[in-house]
Every structure is written in C-alpha cells, then in structure tokens.
Image (tube, rainbow, N blue to C red):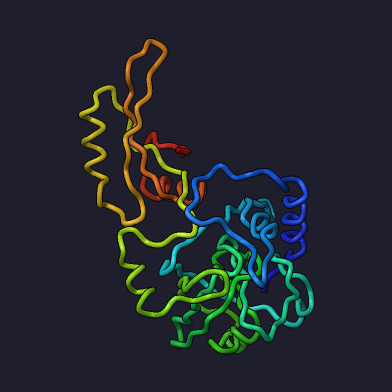
Amino acid sequence: MRIHHFIVLSVLLLSTSLFTGCASKAKVKKKPTATQHTSAARHKATMRSYKVLGKRYHPTYVEVGQVMKGVSSWYGPNFHGKYTSNGEIYNMHARTAAHKTWPMDTMVKVSNLQNGKSTIVRVNDRGPFVRGRIIDCSYTAGKEIGLDRMGIAKVSIQVLGFAGKIQTGKNIKHVSKSTTPTRVQLSNFGVQVGAFRRKEGAQTIKAHYTGLYDRYKPIVKTFHDEGGAPLYRVWLMGFGSEQEARDFKNSHDLAGAFIVRN
C-alpha cells in the first residue's frame, strides 16, 4: 500500500508555485503538453525531482516499448475520492496507476509474472514509496491481474504510449527493436567514460562504446586547458535523467567516471 501520498502532492504543488515560468533548457523532441487529464503546469511540476522519506526521485521521460520489472501493489478505498499527483480525483474503479518517475498519462501494460494476467493502466499519480515496488495499480486494475488476492506480485511493465493513447502491438514491437526509438524527450545527461590528451585515444574509446548500447551513444567533446592544450573527453549520452546516468555509472564500475550535461 502507498503511504505519504499527500507528501508527494504537497511537494509537487510547491514546485509548481516556486518554478512556474522557468523554462527548461533541455533539448527536447516533444515537450509535455496539456491533455484531457493533466494540465501543462501539472506535467511540468510532476517531472521535477522530489524527495520523500529522505530519498530523492528523478522523474524521467521514457520511450514506447520500454520495460521495467519489479513488484506491483494496489491501492483502493483509503484513497478513493482524493487528489492524485496530476490533479485528478482518484477513482479506484478506473484503470490507473502510480509510478515514481514515469510521466503522467503514460500508458502502461502491467503483466503479472506469477499468473500470466495483464491489464493496461494510465499513470496519474506518484508512488509507491516502498523499496522494490515499481507500480501501484488502482483497485480495478489490480483485481484484473490478481492483486486483490495476492496483495503484491512480481510484474513486468511496458510503455504502450503517451497522453492517454496507446500504440498498436505492431508499432510497439517495431519501436522497441529500433536503434533510434521514439522518445518523448531526448536527454542531455551523460557519463564521461574517458579523457585524453591525444585525440586518437578518445576515438578508440568512442569506437569501443559505439553500438554497445541501443539507447546510449558516445561522442567526443574537445576542451582546452588554461595553457590552450586540447583535452578530448568521451561522453556516453542519451540518459533520461541524472539518476539514470548515475545508476549506469554505479552498475558498470566505471572508475573515475562522472555525470555530465551536454
């Protein structure tokens, strides 16, 4: 069950009041806009980083076909009729869900890996703030995949579309295999994986990372020190957020690597 729902809502409302009018400098392919469910202001507010129970979360833009695995829970009567993070009134009988970092109105397929059942939900809230849990389904959605009896279950969640609309199965399969997937936003966060005085060394590292990951692409950036000598830095770009880049660095044991912004 989710707890501290109002803490998140308060943080998002505060963020909206403090930062309204501050334009994002990130290079975007498509900025979040108002939908029939979420206003443009709410979209901006819910995509800012926030802190709950001492942990900071970094909302990130995702792509169609993207998959995440973890544990799902559900929430119902205790929150029915109360506000969700995107400003809607929570309806436990609708097919909606809470996710800690994915954008509002992202359409998600939730598959219960323990019984084979699945459902499609729309993200309209933040949570669940329990270790290991990746999504909180509404009562109706949870019941469709057996959570009303199981309580929690191991699930796989997949992005099907945005703004409350889903792609066809054929398009999702094509996009998920594409080397240039459709994204809501192109990130300017990266990880520096090398720095060289000789350009040849930088090009060697770039070649090593080229094609190694579908989502991340290496580039060489040229800088100059105080004496004017060139320094060639190799950056791996394409991370959806600072936290995603940090998780990649930590999980790949990259000694000396650090987070950068292009």
In the depicted view, which residue is nearer to us: 141 or 152?
141
Residue 168 appears in which quarter of the rendering? Answer: bottom left
Q: Residue at x 45, y 84 (%)?
A: 114
Residue pictured at 77% horizontal, 78% vertical: 78
Left or right of 242: which side holds 231? left
Question: Residue at position x 66%, y 68% from top?
Answer: 125
Residue 50 position, x and y percent, is 66, 52
Quadrant in which the N terminus appears: bottom right
**Residue occupying image coordinates x 68% and y 86%:** 93
The answer to which of 128 and 210 lies nearer the viewer is: 210
Would you say 14 lies left or right of 27 here? Answer: right
Which residue of the protein is positioned furthest toward the top in this rendering? 227
Q: Position of residue 218 (x, y in %)?
A: 32, 43
Q: Compared to 59, does 69 lie above or below? A: below
**Percent of width and height locating residue 262:** 45, 38
Q: How many tags in the picture?
A: 0
Question: Which x, y percent locates residue 112?
Answer: 48, 82
Q: Is residue 193 left or right of residue 101?
A: left
**Lateral position of residue 66 relative to residue 211, left or right:** right
